Image: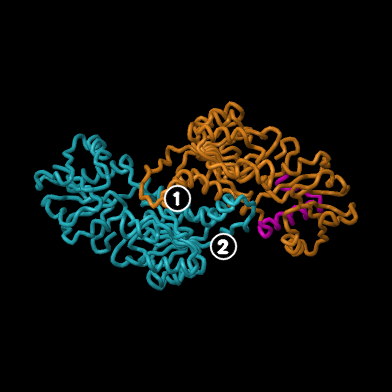
Chain colours: A cyan, B orange
Amino acid sequence: MAILFIAEGDDPADYRPLLDQELGGVDFRIWPEAGDAAEIEAALVWKPPAGVLRRFPNLKAIISLGAGVDHVFLDPELPRGVPMVRLVDRSLTEQMCEYAILGVLRHHRLLPRYEALQRAGEWRKYPAPDTERTPVGILGLGVIGGAAAGKLAALGFPVRGWSRSAKALPGIACFHGAAGLSAMLAECRFLLCFLPLTPETRGIIDRTTLAALPQGAYVINLARGGHVVDEDLIAALDSGHIAGAMLDVFQREPLPPDHAFWRHPAILLTPHIAGLTVAASVVPQIAETIRRARAGKPLANVVDPERQY
Amino acid sequence: MAILFIAEGDDPADYRPLLDQELGGVDFRIWPEAGDAAEIEAALVWKPPAGVLRRFPNLKAIISLGAGVDHVFLDPELPRGVPMVRLVDRSLTEQMCEYAILGVLRHHRLLPRYEALQRAGEWRKYPAPDTERTPVGILGLGVIGGAAAGKLAALGFPVRGWSRSAKALPGIACFHGAAGLSAMLAECRFLLCFLPLTPETRGIIDRTTLAALPQGAYVINLARGGHVVDEDLIAALDSGHIAGAMLDVFQREPLPPDHAFWRHPAILLTPHIAGLTVAASVVPQIAETIRRARAGKPLANVVDPERQY
């Protein structure tokens, strides 16, 4: 009855004592020291190496250490039939909303321009912001995107939201499907991506999407690097059609040192920190997943393997 | 039955046509072209020169073109008995809340540090923010401070608020009076000032207040420059006790070119733009004040001349 930790980049010492406490003792193993493969019941994973998860015949749950699971679906030998669970966590949601609001307000309130004025020692006012006439578009209306939509609407922005299938959120103008996407984009001064990365959403922020946004729109990606076609974004920034972008996620992470994003004057980038998993916050739900998996009970926050979210 | 505009720095052309439309024709005069002083019934003011307002014997309302009225009380010859009205405006409140949230999140989410990492081409993550354990203190719980307190609480920050007299706001730990101030300060990672500037609040952010904040606290002033004792703030920043400050308002505006704030590495300054008065937003309430003043009815948002707010 063992738990295997396969999450390079995360520290198992953050999880082991907390899980031990929650579960009243735990056989916690750290990949590649898996021991007897038949004893592994649950795997805590972040970007697990391909082919590893299929080695455990009694695996009852694959638990992603993040809100997204695209990193697990990269494994072509992923065992079918083992439930995959993603984190739905208050701290993660809150952090992502903070990042989104910070990105929107920083541009909306012209902070980079005022910082430049301070550096120049120049006292000059730009016109007042017009929040009521600054529509914000949200791609993805799940737990996190939906929360961000609500918080941005509470600040006075008219918020539009887009999802694959039709949704209804109070105070949000909701769009769905391919036709809904282009209708929404035409109205948005900001475009924020919260989508899961799936075969359907990969590359969704491409030249067509960017061209559908109004001149001067601002793009914020806090989902996955694979949502953006990098060269299309750079072309749209260089042409001036898109005013700027704030990017937290990249096709390859760490972002390679020679990538053009690092030094592009219209790009603010952060190293995938919009939502950081905090062990103390997520361990209770991980423990509950393990308890339920052991008891053969249905799990919460299970990913649909067809939709991949 | 004339209205006098005495607001250097504001453009009367922003107000005249809108007021004309609202009031169905208006005798709108621009200082110093006041015409017959006995005909002036209402004055729209921002930093009116001392001694001017007393010249109009039939003045029925002094209307500040902002939320604050300290600039009017600077006039030692201010006519007593003429009601002074301040603006209470959705756009102003919303803008101020945006600025407050931007200032808090920028520091809370370590944006300047991540910007420095980008400039250095370095991919490095700082620890996750702990919003639930980041108390924010609000000085002043009026229309604007109260709204900002509520919006910051909605983001997950524990919010404390301080006011001269006792108040109760849902979800906000409220403090008042001198003893309440030091009790609140000891808990605050952020201190935001929304107070009216009065003889009682002038210099409230001095060495004593700053010393009462915990090591590493961050100060945001979007009220009036007179709330801050400049040299005390600089000393607290230089000692490292205060981590940084975002300042929108100054003792003298424009901030003199040789003032140390301009180039202090821990200060972000903006040129009094946290809340800009938007004529289209405020003209309806100005027109209503004028209509009520003409009709001899009681006015809304009248300032108490004793409290000066």
What numbered label is drawn on residue A46?
Answer: none
* Foreground pick, A286 / B217: B217
Residue B5 picture location, percent across and down: 79, 55
Is disc 2 placed on a helix, strand or loop? helix
Residue B180 picture location, percent across and down: 57, 29
State the count of labels: 2
Of the residues shown, which amino acid type is indicated by label 2?
Arg
Specify the quadrant of the image occupied by residue A36: top left
- Residue drawn at x 27%, y 39% is A14
Q: Would you call the spot at circle 2 few (<14 residues within 10 Å), some (14-19), or many (20 or more)?
A: few
Q: Is residue A43 magenta?
A: no
- Residue drawn at x 84%, y 57% is B2
Mark yes or no: residue A172 visible: no
> Is B124 placed above or below B215 here?
below
Marks 1, 2: nearer the viewer: 1
Of the residues shown, which amino acid type is indicated by label 1?
Glu
Which quadrant holds the C terminus of chain B?
top right
Specify the quadrant of the image occupied by residue B14: bottom right
- Residue drawn at x 37%, y 42% is B127
Mark yes or no: residue A155 visible: yes
Is disc 1 placed on a helix, strand or loop? helix
Locate residue B202 relative to residue A247 in the image: left or right. right
What numbered label is drawn on residue B115?
Answer: 1
Residue picked out by circle 2: A133
* Foreground pick, B222 / A115: A115
Q: Is residue B298 magenta?
A: yes
Which quadrant holds the N terminus of chain B?
bottom right
Residue segment shown in magenta? B278-302
> Is B289 placed above or below B184 here?
below
